[in-house]
Image: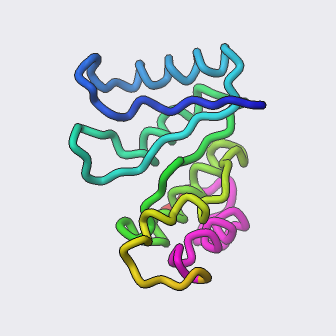
Amino acid sequence: MDYGVHLPVIDFGFERFSLERLCAYVRKAEELGFKGVSTNDHLIYSRPWLDAPTALAAVLAHTSKMAVGTSVALPVVRGPVQVAKALAAIDILSNDRLFGDQEKKLSDDFASRDFTRNNRDGGVCAQVRLGRAGRLGWKRGQAAG
């Protein structure tokens, strides 16, 4: 069984947010043998919260082995194209280490919406696959703009 860690993106008042702290956390996790790092995506929360895709992208250069991903994604709130583009960019920048079936993680986002099972993710899964295939306006080695 493999284990992963959750990126500390919520402020519990113990330490201030810093890039150095996040990068040290990821380096230590990889050194200890953890296989993945994930983060939740919330726009509004009861405590200060770093933006998940931004925080995840910021630490990519500090791990070369761990899979990366989100344990929650918000395509209904952020928009499916924006979420797909962010996740595809993270996948590209991490050299294809994005993990998970993002569709399975979206059920709570859609619980209060009238989405059919076949279209409940707003197309985000298909768009991540398109992004991986280089069809969202950029190809590997180009800036995602």
When the figure is inspected, residue 79 is found, relative to residue 140, above or below; the finding is: below
Label count reads 0
Name the residue: 41% across, 50% down.
41
Residue 90 placed where, x, y %? 58, 49
Q: How is the image coloured?
A: rainbow
When the figure is inspected, residue 25 is found, relative to residue 93, above or below; the finding is: above
Name the residue: 66% across, 73% down.
135
Per the image, is 136 magenta? yes
Residue 140, quarter of the rendered image: bottom right
For this orientation, the residue located farthest to the front is 111
Quarter the N terminus occupies:
top right
For residue 70, side relative to residue 66 (left or right): left
For residue 41, side relative to residue 128 (left or right): left
For residue 100, side relative to residue 120 (left or right): right
Residue 47 placed where, x, y %? 22, 38
Residues 104 and 122: in front is: 104
Residue 83 placed where, x, y %? 48, 63
Name the residue: 66% across, 48% down.
98
Name the residue: 67% across, 52% down.
100
Residue 33 placed where, x, y %? 71, 19
Magenta residues span 119-142
